[in-house]
Amino acid sequence: MDNDLIKQLTIMKQLNNSCLSLKLFERSNISLLEEILNKDSQELERLKNLKRQGKLNFGPIVKESELEELFTSLKDEVDNFLGVLDINAPKIEYCSRFNFFRPELFNKNTCISYAIAGSFLFFPLNWLLRNNTHTSLNSFFIMSTLAFIPTCHMLNTLRYNVDHYISETNSMHLFKNSKANLLPTMGHEYAHHIQRKILFAGVHDFEKNYSIFSEGISRGVQRHVSKIFKEKEDNEAFLYEILNYNVEEMKRLYPIMCYAFGIEPQQSLLKAKNFIEKHYFENNEPNRYLANDYHAIGNSLFYVLEIKFGSSIYKDAIKGDVSFLEK
């Protein structure tokens, strides 16, 4: 077998979700998560107080006609941070949260699922109509059957109500936002674009097997962009959203990791407030299913690795050098 192919397969094996989950779920990482949560929670609370006092300037909502110019202002920063050259810019556009006909909602798997569901529903619906018994119960079943697939589609639409990158069309779909929130989000989605063009080009099971790595890299880029533009524009509002994500996602993982190693979590860290509150416990035990949250695991893992080895890990990772995972 070709040596380059063997090397590529070895790298891909190291980057799959199961391997990276195990890398995060090490006892020694708990103290680092506590350090991050403590620091970012305090900083977030400070910024929230400034926001309540009207002292954070997020700027006006960015117009769609301004998106390309805004992206130009961050592209070089991200390219330099990840050490990449000659990356073509993706298409950038706003999308509506309630547009039920967005292209990403009609991928092959979704259409097949709708077709299968429709074929199963056809026979009971056909029987009810042919029997011509107009009872209220029959009418209820008929209307429920007719509403099933549209309801599924609406739920699928809500699932995609986040900013996202679509590799099939090389496009970033964003929701209207202020400059201070939108620029770091652009950096996050552009990082997905770079990964698909370099490290994961031609990988078909990307989302299924490598989401932790992908989201960890993208959150790292988002954090970097937030800090860079906070300094460039002397505006702390650029930090507000990434701090919220850090606190929210690490609060999800921290009690789960403590539970796994029989450690009592620090309750003061779990009380930190952020803009997306979740329920973390059921019957006084952590929701262990949250361990499948690729954003939370990816962000937590790469934040911990960044503290251990520095921000150069992101540049190394994009090149396929993941030796830092073995240290």
Image: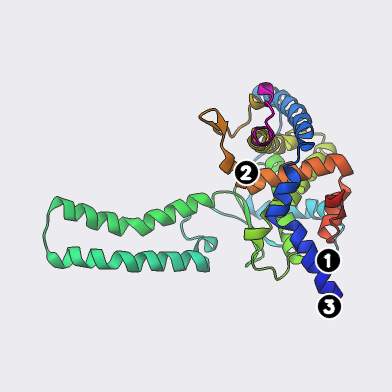
Which contiguous range is marked in magenta?
256-269
Image depth: mark 1 or mark 2 in front: 2
Say if the magenta span includes residue 186: no
Q: Secondary structure at mark 3?
A: loop
Residue 72 in sight = yes
Q: Spatial distance from mark 3 to mark 1, Cα to Cα?
A: 27 Å
Provide the residue designation for mark 1: 86
The local crowd at label 2, few if under 14, some if 14 to 19, many if 20 or more residues have their Cα within 10 Å, is: some
* Residue at point 61%, 32% (across, down): 275
Disc on res. 281: none
Residue 199: where, in percent of width, then height?
77, 64
Residue, far bottom: 1
Quadrant in the rendering for residue 291:
top right
Provide the residue designation for mark 2: 291
Q: Secondary structure at mark 1?
A: loop
The local crowd at label 3, few if under 14, some if 14 to 19, many if 20 or more residues have their Cα within 10 Å, is: few
As drawn, 250 above or below 203: above
